[in-house]
Image: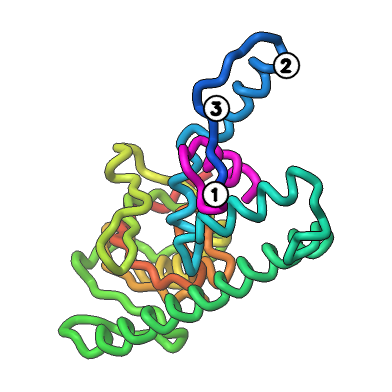
Amino acid sequence: MATLCVALMGMTVISCGQQVNTNVSLKTAIDSVSYAIGVDYGNGLGSGLATIPGGPANADILIAGFLTAIKGDTGSLKISPESASMFIQQYFMAEQTKAGAATKAEGEAFLAANKSKSGVITTESGLQYKVLTEGNGPKPVTTDRVKVHYTGKHLDGTVFDSSVQRGEPATFGLLGVIAGWTEVLQIMPVGSKYQVWIPSDLAYGPSGSQTIKPNSTLEFEIDLLEIVKE
């Protein structure tokens, strides 16, 4: 949040009635480093205000809080410096919980509708799959390592990971992947290709990952190429 504040200091006019002088003279080294810090933090960070959960952020209020704090006028602050960090943390945690609940509900609604579609099989755990190609090889067990090609998608069809696009199959142990993969790979004979829908509790759950939102239901196309022998 502090870096976003600095980014906004490049605005020519701010709501609290003060003018930001953009025609500064860099006469000394401290002038130059001060300006460089502003450029470094400000370059492109202002756009981050639009991505704050529940936002976009109120830039006018943000600037007012920033200027009051940077001048040391603690008596005029509406939130104390001691409380600010905690408030920010609690806010983002609450927004993440809210967003996660919405994502989970979206996934549950999708699976409820998907299970009645032709060819879709739902397991006891709630995982769903559809056989695209049925192989005739052996089925792996939890102690096996396998080689697969796969493409992972969000429910809107956006690809978040694909060995197919990389042009290189993935090799891993069945116990080294998400629970949904461990389950479905034991159903698939070698040579099979399945379309799979994995509920969030069998995927990345409430934590999510770098490319996957918390509580996301995921879709995969998995091509089981072989069981890898040591």
Residue receiving disc 2: 30
Q: Tag 1: residue type? A: Gly
Q: What range of the chain is rendered magenta?
A: 1-17
- Camera-near label (2 vs 3) is 2
The answer to whether residue 6 is magenta is yes
Do the CB atoms of the residues marked 2 and 3 lie less than 8 Å apart? no
* SS at badge 1: loop
Residue plotted at (51% across, 53% down):
15
* C-alpha gap between disc 3 and disc 1: 23 Å
Please tell me in which quadrant of the rendered image residue 93 appears: bottom right
- Specify whether residue 182 is in view: no
Residue receiving disc 1: 17
Q: Tag 3: residue type? A: Val
Give the numbered dot on residue 39.
3
- Tell me if 225 is positioned left or right of 104 in this view: left
Do the CB atoms of the residues marked 2 and 1 lie less than 8 Å apart? no
* C-alpha gap between disc 2 and disc 3: 14 Å
- Camera-near label (2 vs 1) is 1
Closer to the N terminus: mark 2 or mark 3?
2
Q: Residue 175 placed where, x, y %?
A: 57, 61
Q: Is residue 214 above or below residue 25?
A: below
